Image (spheres, rainbow, N blue to C red):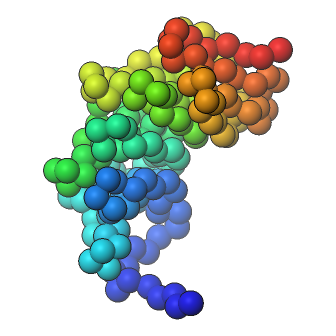
C-alpha cells in the first residue's frame, strides 16, 4: 500500500465537504468554504479548479448527488442556490430559485424517476431538484423551525426515501410517486 499527495495545493480550513463521481470517473468536489469546485482526475493523476467562483461565504454545500444524465447537483446549506456541475462541459452554474438560511440541507437521495430529494436539516421543507426541467422547488409539508432535523437518508426498494431523525421526533418519508412527504409516528 502506498499513499501520496498530488502536487497541487488547496490550503485552508474545511474547504470541501462533499463529492461525487462523474460518469467519466473524475471526482467533483463541491465547495464548502472554498469558492471553486475542485476536480480530481484519477486517470491523469491531477487535480484542478473549475473557473466559476462562488464567493467566500462559509458552509455553502454539504450534500451532492449525481443525476441520471451525469450532472452533479449540490443542495444549498448556506449558499442561496442549488449548484449544478456539468462534467461533460467541465463547467458549473447555479439554478435560479433562491433559498435563504443557514445550514438548510445536509442529505439528498436520487429517486427512481431521477429527481433529487433533499431532506430538511434546518429548513422546514423538503427540497426537490428536477434535473430534467433544470429547476428546484419545495414540497408543501412544513416540518418546523427545529434545528438539525435530519442528517441521513436512503432510497428504499419501493422508491420511497427515508430519513432517520437527528433531532426530529419522527422518521421522515418522502414518496416521489405522489410528490409528498410525511412523518412516521
Instruction: Work out which residue is located at the far bottom of the displayed protein and give it.
Output: 2
Q: Quadrant of the C terminus?
A: top right
| 45 vs 118: above or below | below
Q: Is residue 166 left or right of residue 112?
A: right
Res 144 → quadrant: top right
Q: Residue at x 35, y 86 (%)?
A: 7
Q: Position of residue 2 (x, y in %)?
A: 52, 91
Residue 114 in sight = yes
Q: Quadrant of the N terminus?
A: bottom right
Q: Is residue 17 left or right of residue 170?
A: left
Q: Is residue 140 left or right of residue 185?
A: left
Instruction: Work out which residue is located at the far left of the displayed protein and give it.
Output: 89
Residue 36 in sight = no
Q: Residue at x 56, y 11 (%)?
A: 180
| 2 vs 89: above or below | below
Q: Position of residue 58 (x, y in %)?
A: 48, 50
In the foreground, 141 or 60:
141
| 74 vs 26: above or below | above
Q: Position of residue 155 (x, y in %)?
A: 59, 32
Q: Residue at x 51, y 87 (%)?
A: 3
Res 69 → quadrant: top left
Q: Residue at x 45, y 55 (%)?
A: 19
In the foreground, 155 or 76:
155
Q: Position of residue 184 (x, y in %)?
A: 77, 16
User: Total number of numbered labels?
Assistant: 0
Amino acid at each position: 500500500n502506498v499513499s501520496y499527495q498530488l502536487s497541487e495545493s488547496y490550503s485552508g480550513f474545511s474547504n470541501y465537504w462533499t463529492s461525487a463521481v462523474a460518469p467519466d470517473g473524475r471526482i467533483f468536489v463541491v465547495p464548502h468554504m472554498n469558492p471553486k469546485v475542485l476536480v480530481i482526475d484519477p486517470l491523469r493523476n491531477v487535480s484542478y479548479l473549475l473557473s466559476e467562483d462562488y464567493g467566500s461565504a462559509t458552509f455553502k454545500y454539504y450534500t451532492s448527488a449525481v443525476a441520471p444524465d451525469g450532472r452533479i447537483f449540490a443542495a444549498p446549506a448556506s449558499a442561496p442556490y442549488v449548484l449544478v456541475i456539468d462534467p461533460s462541459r467541465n463547467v458549473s452554474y447555479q439554478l435560479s430559485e433562491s433559498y435563504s438560511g443557514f445550514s438548510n440541507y445536509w442529505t439528498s437521495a436520487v429517486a427512481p424517476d431521477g429527481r433529487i430529494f433533499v431532506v430538511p436539516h434546518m429548513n422546514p421543507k423538503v427540497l426537490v431538484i428536477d434535473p430534467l426541467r433544470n429547476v428546484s422547488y419545495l414540497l408543501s409539508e412544513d416540518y418546523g423551525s427545529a434545528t438539525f432535523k435530519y442528517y441521513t437518508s436512503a432510497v428504499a426498494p419501493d422508491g420511497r426515501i427515508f430519513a432517520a431523525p437527528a433531532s426530529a421526533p419522527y422518521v421522515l418519508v418522502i414518496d416521489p410517486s405522489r410528490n409528498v412527504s410525511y412523518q412516521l409516528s
